[in-house]
Image (cartoon, rainbow, N blue to C red):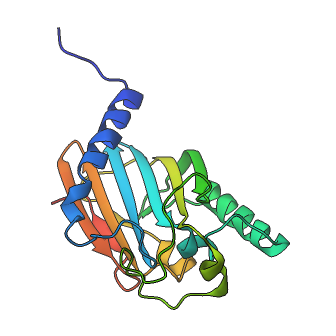
Amino acid sequence: MPTRHTPTRTSSLLLSLSLAAMPVLAADNPVAHQHGHADLQLAVDHERIDLVLLSPAYNLMGFEHKPRTEAQRQRVQTVESWAVETPLITVLGIDCTITSASMHASWGDTDDHKHDDKHDEHKHGHQHHDDHAQSATHSDVEITQTLNCPGLSESSRLQTSLMTHFPELEHLNVQWVGPQGQGATRLTPGNSQFRLSR
């Protein structure tokens, strides 16, 4: 008897496979925590897209420590509201809706990775700001979303407004996996569109 997968099981399987596909761009992204860079992973199952955005907190918040001021707490709240209300990607010509979304920030509380002033391990490519210099650790943000996109096909053109909304974000490594295979691309502010087809 053939195995049947429910959409949830299939998408979960595809998301797991997409995590395994991360080495596709490993040569282009040798440093996991790099300001200006983020990773977006997509698992496509017919009209459903599961997404995971992984980014240094600095790219989205402007700082990498637990919020200390009211303005910083408001910034975290603003980013979280945006993340649960705005699709990380849009499909041109299709109205996608968010069916679930969440944001998690690791403020480095349990991370033993210390900030190295010599930057032997991290090539930031940015000047340090006072907020970052005071931070003893690097912090990351993970945003997850599930989208329902009726009419989605392999030839659909997808785009993201992440680099417009978060100007500190300069490069977005996108990896996807779906029924037709997997792929990867790197997006920039001047090139924010891609297709799922190979």
Residue at coordinates 29% horizontally, 54% vertically from top-left? 176
The foreground one among 165 and 149 is 165
User: Up-down: is 10 above or below 101?
Assistant: above
Q: As rendered, which of 118 and 122 lies closer to the eye?
A: 118
Image quadrant assignment for residue 2: top left
**Residue for point 40% across, 47% down:** 49
In the picture, the quarter occupied by the N terminus is top left
Q: Residue at x 36, y 36 (%)?
A: 11
Residue 162 as seen in the image, left or right of residue 44: right
- Where is residue 37 shown, x and y percent of the image? 41, 74
- Which residue is at a point 62% across and 55% down the rendered structure image? 109
Q: Is residue 161 visible?
A: no
Compared to residue 119, the image places residue 100 above or below, namely: above
Residue 90, percent from left and from top? 45, 63
Outermost residue, top direction? 1
- Quarter of the picture holding the C terminus: bottom left
Q: Nearer the viewer, residue 25 or 68?
A: 68
* Relative height, residue 43 to residue 136 (above, below): above
With 113 as the anchor, is 176 left or right in this view? left
x, y percent for residue 87 = 53, 58
Give how far across and how far down residue 77 sits, in percent. 74, 62
